[in-house]
Image (cartoon, rainbow, N blue to C red):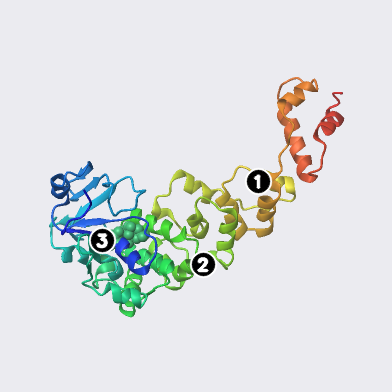
Amino acid sequence: MTLKDKNLYYVGGVVRDEILGTQSFDTDFCYEGNAIEFARKSGLNIIKENPDFGTVRVTPPQTSPSRECDPSIDIASTREETYPQAGHLPVIKNIGCSLKNDLKRRDFTINAMAKNTVTGDIIDYFGGIKDIRNKKLKVLHSKSFIDDPTRILRGLKFAVRFGFELDDETKKLQDDYLDNINYDMSYHRLKKELKETFNLNKEEAYKKFIEQGIYKLLGGNITPSQYFPSREGVSALIDKYKPYKPWLVWLGFFDLSNLELTGEEQKIIDSIPNVKPKNNFETYKLFNNLPLETVLLYALSIDYDIAINYLDRLKNIKIKTTGKDLKQLGIPNGKIYKEIFDFLLEEKIKNPQTDEIKLVKEKYGFI
Ligand code: ATP
Ligand code: MG
């Protein structure tokens, strides 16, 4: 059995990526009609059905055209979406509608194409192929950003990923929206797109984010000039030290309170110390238990050299002496161990060549 049917289409990013000649992140399928009934009728191994959305998750057949590594694939029924509450999740209607109506609800023309799994025909009602050729991002209708402002960030993400620009009309719609933002929106989705965009770690994304005023979507009172004199070198810093959350290094100085940060994310931002340590040991103590992202934010906002000295040198300094060593020296177990370890670390930080045991003997006199 293969995953082919005259009503089954590849849809969205995978079609775009094939035309672009780039590798796809995932393979989305869309069935013109009811995907759940299709999966049942075709004897596919169904993992999960979601009748409210008309989607079904199945195990890919051996000869399936999806990427071999996919443990499961999702097939969506064609559907329409409406936005009774602008900026919030859409309401689904007409599951099993025409392919054309399904494609109409999508974000950009380049993502609104389908490819038939039997004939290989590309279905391109809205000029997606032409827009790929011209490197343009174009929304499908003038209310697109009002319905779903996260599309502005998706546009930024695709612009940066593919080197595309907004087409003139779409840019105007974006400007209009950013002049009149409805802050009652789904920040959950906005956060997802922000993460994906800034985890790409491209200076270009930040530049456009500021220049086009996209940052205004975050809400809050801060304007860019208040917190970022310059963001040059951020990308190199992230490439060098590889934090888990590059997006927070890019955006950590914005007011992110609308995004419902996790405890871990909030800690990264809240623990940026506003002091300048006077020596290496103070520096070590200051940064020792802080997340890497926080140290990088310190480098960018308070003192670059102090933070880099920590990351390149001090962070790697460790003492070799263990509790066992101290015991062998005849030092009775107790609070003093911590004092000795701190003392040794301080001396090691001052002078990495320090002979630890010799120093303990000298200082504590257990010989
Ligand atoms: P990627 O390569 O990043 O996965 P993608 O285009 O496949 O890009 P997905 O987020 O996987 O993006 O979404 C799949 C498809 O769903 C898109 O190609 C687009 O057609 C549609 N889509 C996703 N998000 C939206 C949205 N906010 N508004 C309208 N359509 C969307
Ligand atoms: Mg995708």
Residue 202 located left or right of residue 236: left
Asked if one can make out residue 272 in the rendered structure from this viewpoint, the answer is: no
Question: Residues under labels 3 and 2: Cα distance?
Answer: 30 Å
Front residue of this view, candidates 178 and 168: 168
List the residue tagged with mark 1.
286
Picture quarter with ligand 2: bottom left
Give the residue pinned by disc 2. 203
Secondary structure of the residue carrying tag 2 is helix
Q: Between disc 1 and disc 3, whose residue precedes?
A: 3
Label 3 sits on residue: 11
Indicate yes or no: mark 2 CB to ligand 1 under 8 Å. Answer: no
Q: Disc 1 residue type?
A: Leu
Residue at the (42%, 57%) spot, across then down:
196
- Position of the C terminus by quadrant: top right
Residues under numbered marks 1 and 2 in contact, where contact means CB atoms less than 8 Å apart: no
Q: Residues within 10 Å of mark 1 (few under 14, many from 20)?
A: some
The residues bearing labels 1 and 2 have C-alpha atoms spaced at a distance of 29 Å
* Above or below, 139 relative to 348: below
Q: Is residue 360 visible?
A: yes
Give coordinates of residue 37: x percent, y percent.
13, 48
Mark 1, secondary structure of its residue: helix
Residue nearest the observer in this picture, 102 or 213 = 102
Specify the amino acid type for callout 3.
Val
Distance, label 1 to label 3, CA atoms, is 51 Å
Left or right: where 303 falls relative to 187: right
Q: Residue at x 14, y 52 (%)?
A: 34
Residue drawn at x 40%, y 73% as measured from the top left: 164
Name which residue lies at 56% across and 48% down.
Answer: 271
Looking at the picture, how far across and down is residue 94, in whole percent?
A: 12, 57
Ligand 1 has an atom within 8 Å of the beta carbon of the residue at disc 3 = yes
Q: Residue furthest bottom?
A: 168
Q: Earlier in the sequence, mark 3 or mark 2?
A: 3
